[in-house]
């Protein structure tokens, strides 16, 4: 039954539904120089920006992690607690440094806005843990939409759809 | 609640977000949004929006600031509308109300984000085929009977009215809006006149920062109109095709001051009834027979009744034509004898699409001179390439017959 074309199509539709936007076309993506820094280690966070001429990015660091500097122009950066705001003016990359605490883990989350394109969204969360040790500490920010889209359920559903589609294709 | 109290309340609420003159973020109020000012404004916005900071710029403000900074080089834009009035724009158009279907159509031709049109006139609202989905926008009535309360509730930043027709009604709307909503932008364009349309296309394109698209559309429009003008330029006056153009109403023609006469003459037609001051004079039936027109053109489309974008209905236009042929004495008219009696729908001759209708007229008046002119193809390209609507002329709508 699963091999029927309609069922295979259904599986592919499921696949497209559950492979989230996080996997394709996000204008802002984040990479870390170290996801498991040592205690007190300074690591770099790099934001890659694609297609935003004028806009902004606001990053939220997990509790205990501290902003340590950036190469972004001073007049386009604002730090308030765990949040760091950057204005984007034709930038394609923003790099900033973070000092890790003695211990602790959490997510670096972010929000972007494209003022000219009149759109906004979440930067997919990046998990950090000092020495790779998970603690009960929560991320200072709210769980972003992109992260929700990439939830375990979605991943599971996507994997199931792939398997079913593949199985159907062999019959 | 007392109606007057309600209106007063509306007036208080009606001042649109962009009413204050000045570019958002222009901290020193010198009329230019410098790079540092923009950067500071953007940071202040992010602070207020996401970082629990204080600030008075909202999302529309920063988006408008970004637009002015990026697209207008940080300066306000001055535009002169078709009344000759210069309007200074400190922000882009964000909440637009159009009282003119022709301007609405032109905005769509130019690629404007039509979601920013928050309300339309009642006639555009009723054109479900040509303006599909616009029934979800507010209907603010006509220029003769505007729903001013609804306009005010919508908090528009820009109103578009006609420039040179129904001027008393449009002047009144403008006066009332400017009194109640300081800073509101009232722009006036016709968008249906061959003499001014190309310029209006460019002006509106400049306002919405779609100059490239404006040039493309103006060139498309101009190439048709130039082809018609060039194709008729060398015809001596006494050799021009005699045309009886009949308005929607029987035995009512068009005189020199009527827009339809302008298009008839552009296409090389000679209107024997062009004299006189009445725009749409009633003519003596016998005078038509005496004038012996070589071509008869009958206008269809009154009240959206038949044809046009409303439906594929060639029988209805055929019936209109047959009624003309059956008129007493018309069998003696050259146009009838030569089978040159045509029906044209006002959808393609009266408004922004006049270039399509004028192309049909030229082809009917001078089939040899305009053998290469294809009004049907021009029409389809306009709909698909500029209006962006899914409308197949092969099976939808009826605009000319035969």
Image (cartoon, coloured by chain):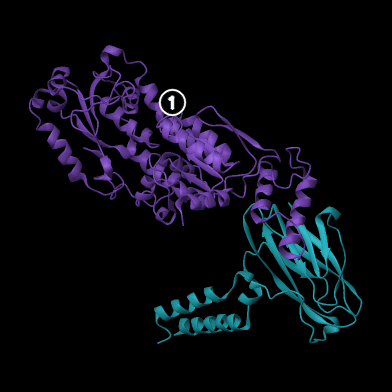
Label 1: element kind: loop
Number of on-image labels = 1
**The C terminus of chain B: image quadrant:** top left
> Which residue, given by chain and number where applicable, does mark 1 sit on?
B195
Among the chains pictured, the one given cyan colouring is A
Q: Position of residue B297 (x, y in %)?
A: 23, 30
Kindly identify which chain the residue marked by label 1 belongs to.
Answer: B
Q: Position of residue B4 (x, y in %)?
A: 48, 49
Q: Is residue B169 above or below residue B369?
A: below
Left of B248 or right of it: where is A45?
right
Left of B201 or right of it: where is A43?
right
Is residue B114 visible to us here? no
Q: Is residue B178 above or below residue A64?
A: above
Please identify which colour was used for chain B in the image: purple
Q: Is residue A43 above or below residue B186?
A: below
Camera-nearest residue between B211 and B147:
B147
Q: Please name the residue shown 54% across and 34% down the image.
A: B203
Answer with the quarter of the image where residue B92 lies. top right
């Amino acid at each position: 039954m699963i091999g029927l074309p309609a069922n295979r199509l259904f599986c592919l539709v499921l696949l497209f539904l559950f492979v989230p936007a996080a996997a394709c076309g996000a204008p802002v993506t984040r990479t870390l120089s170290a996801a498991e820094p040592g205690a007190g280690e300074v690591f770099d966070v790099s934001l890659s920006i694609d297609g935003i001429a004028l806009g902004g990015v606001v990053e939220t660091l997990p509790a205990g992690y501290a902003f340590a500097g950036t190469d972004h122009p001073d007049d386009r950066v604002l730090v308030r607690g765990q949040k760091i705001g950057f204005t984007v003016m034709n930038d394609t990359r923003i790099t900033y440094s973070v000092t890790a605490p003695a211990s602790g883990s959490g997510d670096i989350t972010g929000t972007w806005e494209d003022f000219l394109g009149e759109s906004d969204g979440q930067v997919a969360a990046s998990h950090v843990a000092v020495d790779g040790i998970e603690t009960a500490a929560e991320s200072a920010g709210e769980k972003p939409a992109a992260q929700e889209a990439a939830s375990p359920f979605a991943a599971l559903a996507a994997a199931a759809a792939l398997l079913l589609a593949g199985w159907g294709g062999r019959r | 609640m007392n109606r007057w109290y309600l209106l007063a309340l509306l007036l208080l609420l009606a001042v649109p977000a962009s009413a204050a003159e000045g570019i958002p973020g222009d901290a020193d109020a010198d009329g230019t949004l410098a790079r540092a000012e923009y950067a500071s404004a953007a940071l202040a916005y992010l602070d207020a929006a996401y970082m629990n900071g204080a600030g008075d710029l909202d999302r529309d403000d920063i988006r408008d600031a970004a637009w002015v900074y990026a697209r207008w080089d940080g300066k306000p834009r001055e535009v002169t509308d078709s009344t000759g009035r210069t309007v200074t724009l400190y922000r882009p158009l964000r909440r637009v109300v159009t009282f003119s279907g022709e301007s609405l159509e032109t905005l769509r031709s130019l690629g404007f984000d039509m979601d920013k049109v928050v309300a339309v006139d009642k006639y555009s609202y009723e054109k479900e085929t040509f303006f599909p989905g616009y029934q979800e926008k507010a209907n603010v009535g006509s220029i003769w009977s505007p729903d001013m309360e609804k306009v005010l509730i919508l908090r528009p930043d820009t109103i578009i009215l006609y420039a040179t027709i129904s001027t008393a009604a449009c002047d009144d709307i403008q006066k009332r809006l400017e009194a109640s909503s300081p800073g509101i932008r009232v722009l006036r364009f016709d968008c249906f006149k061959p003499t001014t349309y190309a310029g209006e296309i460019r002006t509106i394109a400049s306002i919405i920062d779609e100059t490239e698209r404006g040039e493309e559309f103006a060139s498309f429009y101009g190439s048709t109109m130039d082809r018609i003008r060039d194709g008729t330029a060398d015809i001596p006056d006494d050799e021009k095709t005699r045309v009886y153009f009949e308005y929607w109403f029987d035995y009512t023609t068009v005189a020199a001051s009527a827009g339809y006469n302008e298009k008839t003459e552009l296409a090389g037609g000679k209107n024997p009834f062009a004299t006189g001051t009445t725009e749409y004079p009633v003519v003596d039936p016998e005078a038509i027979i005496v004038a012996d027109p070589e071509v008869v053109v009958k206008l269809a489309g009154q009240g959206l009744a038949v044809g046009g974008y409303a439906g594929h209905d060639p029988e209805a236009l055929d019936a209109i034509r047959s009624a003309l042929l059956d008129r007493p004495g018309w069998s003696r008219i050259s146009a009838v004898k030569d089978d040159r009696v045509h029906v044209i729908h006002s959808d393609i001759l009266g408004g922004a699409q006049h270039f399509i209708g004028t192309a049909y007229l030229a082809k009917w008046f001078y089939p040899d001179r305009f053998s290469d002119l294809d009004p049907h193809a021009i029409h389809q390209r306009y709909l698909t390439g500029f209006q962006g609507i899914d409308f197949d002329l092969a099976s939808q709508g009826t605009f000319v017959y035969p």
